[in-house]
Structure formats: C-alpha cells, structure tokens
Image (spheres, rainbow, N blue to C red):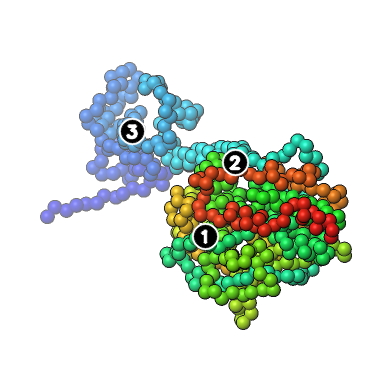
Amino acid sequence: MVGFEVGAVPFNPDGWGPPESSSPTLSVPNHPSNVPFAPFSRSEKLGRIADWTRSLPNQGRPGSRQGHHPSDSAFDFSGDDSFATLAADEDSSFRLVDTSAKSHHHQNANRPKFNPRWRFNPHHQRSQLPQRRDEEVEAKKREAEKERARRDRLYHLNRSQGPQRRESAVFKSSVDIQPEWNMLDQIPFSTFSKLSFSVPEPEDLLICGGLEFYDRSYDRITPKNSRPLERFKNRNFFKVTTTDDPVIRRLANEDKATVFATDTILSTLMCSPRSVYSWDIVIQRVGNKLFFDKRDGSQLDLLSVHETSQEPLPDVKDDINSAYSLSVEAAYINQNFSQQVLIRDGNKVAFEESNPFANEGEEVASVAYRYRRWKLDDDMHLVSRCEVQSVMEVSKQKSFLTLNALNEFDPKYSGVDWRQKLETQRGAVLATELKNNANKLAKWTAQALLAGADMMKLGYVSRVHPRDHFNHVILAVVGYKPRDFASQINLNTSNMWGIVKSIVDLCMKLNEGKYVLVKDPSKPQVRIYEVPPDAFENDYVEEPLPEEEQVQPLAEDADDAEANATAKDVEEKEIIIEAA
C-alpha cells in the first residue's frame, strides 16, 4: 500500500507564506526552487496560482532579469495586473440603480456625464463607486426639501388669497349708509375683549305665553334611525322688535327700567367680537330711556350659516348654497325643529298672560316670553324679553329648555359627513361647527343664559340630498347645560355684560334722537351713526325675492305682517313713550 509522507511545515515568523531563507533546513521537499509568491491580504481576491499560457512581453528585452528560468515565469506575477483585472471584471458587473427623479430636459446622449464626487476624488483611478446608503440619504433629503417648499408655497398662497376671498363674499353692508348720516364713533372689537362687568341675578317681571313638554324620545335618535323634519304651516311665529312689544311699552310707562331690548339684540351685542357678517341695531333715545330695536326685515331675524368658516360660500344670491339662501333655510329649519320635538297632545304649561302678539283663536308656536330685569348700576336697570321654547319635568320640577338646530347642507363645505361621524365622532362634528358657526352658537348660548334656561337642546338636521333644500331629516339631538357649554366654547359672561354696559353708557351720553349701530362688513369694528327720525320706516326695507324663488314653506313673512298689523302706528308709539 502506497504511503503518504507529510513533510515538515516551516514556520515563517516574519509574515505570510514560506520563509525567504534559503537554509536547507527550511526548504520544502519536492518543491521547485525560486517559485515566486504573490503577496496578498485577507481582503483581496485570490487569483491564479500558475499560468503557463501567458507570455511575458518583455522576456527578450535587454535589461530583463538574467538567470530567470522560462518555466518559472508561470509562477511569476510580479508586475502583472491579473489580480486587478479580475477585480475590475467582477466590479464591472455591479451597477448602482439611480432612484432620484430624472430631469425632463432634453440631454445629448453623446455628452459625457461627470459625477463631481468622482471628478474631485483623489483616488478616482481606483474606479470606486459611491456608497449606496449615501445616495439614498441624499435622495430623501432632496425629496423632503421639495415637500417643504411645496407646503410653504401653499401656506403663503392661502394666507394671501384666503382672507381676500372671504371678505369679498361678505362685503355687502346690512344697511345702506346714506350720505346725510353723521358718523359719531367707531369702536374696534379689540377694545371689547378687555371689558368686564358683573351683574346680579335678574328678576322675572312677567311671563307670557304657553309651553308644551319636550319629547324625550328624540334624545335617542341616531343617523341610522333618523326622522324626517315636519312642516308646521299652521303655527305662527313672531319676530317683534322692542318698541312694537305692548308689554315693553307698558313696562316703560311704569318706569320699570331705563334700557329695553330683546334677547336677540342683546346676544348680538354680547357676541359681536365673533361676528363676521354685517348687522345693524337701531337705537332710540327717548327722554332718559334707551330702546334697542331691529329694522323690519333685518338680518337678525335669520340665522347665519358658515359665518366664521374659511371656505367661501357662493356669491350668487339665487344659489341654494349662498349665504342668504342658507340663512332663510336655517331659520325655517330652526322653527320647525323647535315644534317637532314636542309632545303635541294639547297639554300645555300656561303662564300669567297669553301670547301678547297672537290674535284670539290663533294657533301659535310653543314659546314663553320671560320679561327679566337686570341691575346695571344704582339708577339704571335693563329689561329684556327672553324666549324659551319648551319645558321638561326633572325631579318633579319644571325646567325651561331652548331648542335650536344646526343644519348640514353639503359635507364638502365642512369636510365632515354627519351621517358617518355623528355616532362615532360627535365631538369632532361639534368642533367643526364651533369653527364654522362660532357666532351663531355663541348667540344661542347667550340667549339661553339670558332666559335662565336649565337646558339647551341642539339638533343636527341635514338635507335629504345636498341639492334638495326643501326636505330634511333629524340625525341627532344633544342637550347641554348653558353655563357648561359657555365655558366649553370660551364664552365669558362677565365680558358679555361688559360689552353691553359700555355701549349703554356710550348711548346714554348721546342726545335724544335715533341712531344706528352698524357692524363694518370688512373690518372687526362697529360704527355709530346719527340718522333722521323717519329713517327705516318705509324706505329701508330690503326688497324680497320673487315668490317662486323663495324657500318654501316659510311662514315668517306672514307672521311679521300679522305682528305689524297688531302694532300701533309710529306716532302713537312715540306719544306713549314721551308720556312716560
């Protein structure tokens, strides 16, 4: 059997490979002498051990090494770039994919392309490619810079164009300023925010009308079991101004107070810093008394929609989504909602006097008028007519309720679809309404506080279809305590009364006559004008829309006509007031 003898393996203390010593003790048996060793490191790729197919180009040149056997050239790789060539061949098969965005500009295909990182690299001859991770990081940085620049452009575009578009939608004043009017003062809203005044608890002078009980089943309504909004054509609603109220005339004759107003007018003054649309209030100084009135056909009889929203509404008045059309629609919804959520079984809570504006045998809406008096200082009291729409029995005690309805006309304007969000994200829906209708919700809260209501019910009413402004459904009804809701929407009662007190003090310094307080349509300020005594009697009523273009059904115009028919003429009214 043939044996195999393992020779001695020499140890090289100076490095890798066989030792360079020619000592016979360190020679390897059966090993050709003078075989060159190709030095390498662990990081280098290993090539050939021997190559007999190649021929050295400088073999026969003068100056070549003498005594070098031709057969040894197969092992001689000194001065040869075989290893580098192999490495270059393998590296050439690797390509880095460029993920950056390509330029759309036309480029010449024959034009040489230079990479600055390679051009200025001192080791460019080694043909090293840039690291892939560095390229990805740079690409992400570039994309982030582009996104940041895009957001900045959109932000500045909205800042520059948004307010201009919003102002153009509400540029019209609520009343035409006549050249003979004398402007006495203008008050910026910034001064209102610093005012504060505390009033004691009011006292009830008289309660008129009758209230029906609230139907608690409406508290369980959800978008899945919504109820259609009914129409109450036979019930009459009254929007009577201060000086046309026979009860206020009687109280003025009895010297019960020096300042008279309604809850609608007071809430407009109290929440004026939140208003965007223009409004006006007529002020009459008669003797030592002050009367705050509204004009016939005033914007105060309607309800604003999307007043504080940044999304502009259509400017065309005939559009069903214009500011005016939505205001009429909101008033119609609010009236019908306040009567539908009641138990209409004939059981009513009657008060001292009946409805002062209704004729005998006339069917009127469920409403009670509380004439309340506040003490402003030692010799000045304020009387206001406040409304509540329903009553509810809680713990064997009757609680007054105010009923109001928020209306959704098109989800694309608000960005929140009530049918999808009311059940799961009711807070988000309310937050959106507080952003888009901050003034309207603040006025409703102020009216509930003035009326001393124990609860305010907010209904969510939506169109059956976004293009159908006649048919609506009730999606939900939520109740809030007025004081808790006021703190939730950051409505300060001391600031509200501070605004009223400052305006009353300012008007008490004026001479006897008629004045008008107008909210500027484009600036956050109000102006006081002195107007002729016969202003707003016949010539300043807004022209109504044709009957076929009006939102139907709406009994407001007929009710106002009946209310005006019951009122006495202006001359008799002035005689009674002067006699006081």
- Distance from disc 2 to disc 3, alpha carbons, whole Å, reads 66 Å
Q: Quadrant of residue 419?
A: bottom left
- Name the residue type under label 3: Ser
Residue 82 image position (x, y, % from top left): 31, 31
Residue 282 image position (x, y, % from top left): 74, 50
- Distance from disc 3 to disc 1, alpha carbons, whole Å, reads 88 Å
Secondary structure category for the residue under label 1? loop
Asked if residue 568 lies left or right of residue 132, the reply is right
Q: Kindly identify the residue that appears in the image at 48 percent across and 28 percent down.
A: 116
Asked if residue 462 lies left or right of residue 560, the reply is left
- Name the residue type under label 1: Lys
Q: Which mark is residue 233?
A: 1
Secondary structure category for the residue under label 3? helix
Q: Quadrant of residue 151?
A: top right
Instruction: Locate the N terminus by quadrant.
Output: bottom left
In terms of sequence position, does the residue under pointer 2 or pointer 3 come before the other? 3
Q: Which mark is residue 169?
A: 2
Which residue is denoted by mark 3 in the rendering? 92
User: How many neighbours does mark 2 have within 10 angstroms: few (below 14), some (14-19), or many (20 or more)?
Assistant: some
Residue 452 image position (x, y, % from top left): 69, 69
- Distance from disc 1 to disc 2, alpha carbons, whole Å, reads 33 Å
